[in-house]
Amino acid sequence: MAVPSPKTESLRSPQALPPRARTGSFARHETVTFYLLIAPWLLGLLLLVLGPMLASLGISFTKWDLLSPARFIGLDNYERLFTRDPLFWQSLKVTAVYTIFYVPIELAGALLLAMLMNQKIRGVSVFRTIYYLPSVLPAVAFIVVWIWVLHPDVGLINTLLSYIGVEGPRWLANPDWALPALLMMSLWGLGRGMVIYLASLQGIPKHLYEAAAIDGANGWQCFRKITLPLLTPTIFFNLVLSIISTFQTFTSAFVATNGGPLDSTLFYVLYLYRQAFQYFNMGYASALAWVLFVIILVLTLIIVRTSDRWVYYEGERR
Amino acid sequence: MTPPSPWQSQSIRQRTGRALGVIAALAVAVLFLLPLFWMVTSSLKPDYQVLESPPRWLPHPIVWSNYPEALTYVPFGRYALNTLFIAVLVILGHVLSCTLVAYGFARFRAPGKGFLFLVLLATMMLPYPVTMVPLYIVFSRIGWVNSFWPLIVPAFLGNPFYIFLLRQFFLTLPPDLEDAARVDGASTLQTIWHVILPASRPAMATVAIFSFQAVWNDFLPPLIYLHDQTKYTISLGLSFFRSTYDVKWGYLMAASLVTMLPVVLLFFFAQRLFIQGITLTGMKEG
């Protein structure tokens, strides 16, 4: 890849360019200008993305604590990871279980909220604002509030449960309840998905529903035959982003539980963080990072591959 | 048969459906607001009432002192200033770099462009943890650990989400004005400055808002790079506060509320831009 240096002089040269004409020298000039304009990003791509990714792969074959020189150990890190590290499997399990539960619940919840907000309800914009508000809150403040809401003795949730005679669990302090508690907490951020679904709901032409109503379709049939198919591109897009970000869950685990109790919320990236920045096992952490990358890549590719079976694109024949 | 008036045409079923909708919307709204309510009331309770069981819903008497005490207990002003400093430079970096790159992608034809655009989209999906370790090593070798630079400098090298957002916006602008400017002898940079920027204020504002919000909310990178307490960002400070003074819940809630405030205000003033940005890119912070 030829990367022109990001000099700006030639950009400033006041050459009068004929609009939309494409002679040979003009095309070359256009190419040069294009690469000069995108040079910052290309530089970033090399220095912040491709370079580090390759470096990370290289480091994953070494043992390196940053104090003594890196020592090449071949595939030892990967071997240790897969065969001798129960915490790796635990962190993978925690992350996978959380993703399996969170992603569908989030999808369905956000879609339901969006459909509710797509009704003609008085004050709908106020409701929308209320639902969306938690999603913009700073993650740490969001989590700190929830630690308090989940307080076993005087928290909001257990107080409400006590009104109906239920003694709530000790949530974040209980290995069985800590992960469900984090899941419940994350659902407070449902508004983000809602906004995205709402935008595409509002893009569905009204006449489709009118035609269906004339044909005597009921609400469920309209949803099943019109709304859902036309939403599949958005669902697809959200599904991919949701899985990618759920696999990177870090802040809630770090702030709310620090992986505990009994490693019941030891998320993958939290374990990676510990290996890298608490134990300074840079080689091992890089191996963890690459395994994560491959997992996410494979999951994304699976969804993309299956997408032509269930994602409907308008203007495309099925 | 005369067509029924719109009012009559609403069957009882439709109206009950609508009423149920309102009830559901209200119920969900209460659920979404309760945690915030719980935070606010706890922050206004005197110390001895915070851990009272069963808890009271409204503080009595209302105590404001948690706020000044929490904010001086740890140097929150300092944290806020640090975060603002980073945010201003990051916004500048993103607006500058992403405008240039997005304009390139929106308006110029060049070999390799389609492929590079795909690469750009692919990098949106790249998990930060994958590059985290080598980046840390590089930044530590050049002595930038425990400084703001690792958090600021990458902003000047673009961000795929904002580039995509701006490119989509630039594509909606009619090219006539730019052509006219070019005929008048304006260079590409002059065209961007005099024609594109003035026409793109909402898009620029969206990028600025998202950048601000991202810096304000950011956690993992500051956690890795900032070790000195005087250099903490607001989110880092709050997390530190939480892990150190676990029992001072009144303080913690006051501090959380103050941390939320700038973002909430920004959200209320620029809700439309927020929503446009999020629907365009589906981006998620943190």
Image: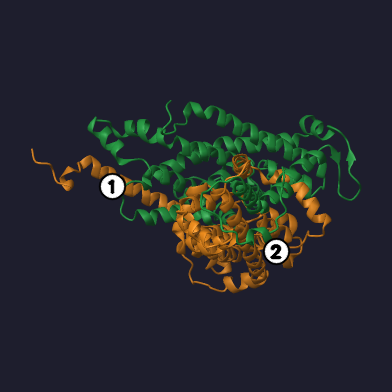
Chain colours: A green, B orange
Tell me which corner region of the image, top left, top right, bottom left or bottom right, holds residue B226.
bottom right
Graded by Cα atoms within 10 Å as few (under 14), some (14 to 19) or many (20 or more), the crowding at tag 1 reads few
Q: Residue at x 47, y 31 (%)?
A: A311
Kindly identify which residue carries mark 2. B232
Nearest the eye: B82 or A209:
A209
Name the image quarter holding the N terminus of chain B: top left
Q: Is residue A100 left or right of residue A287?
A: left
Counting from the top left corner in percent of width and height, residue B159 is at 62, 52
The tag on residue A309 is: none
- What SS does tag 1 mark? helix
Mark 2 vs mark 1: in front:
2
Nearest the eye: B51 or B62:
B62
Q: Is residue A71 left or right of residue B240?
A: right
First reached walking from the N terminus: tag 2 or tag 1? 1
Nearest the eye: A209 or B103:
B103
Q: Residue at x 72, y 47 (%)?
A: A46
The number of discs equals: 2
In the depicted structure, whether residue B188 falls above or below residue B1: below
User: Which chain is home to disc 1?
Assistant: B
Kindly identify which residue carries mark 1. B19
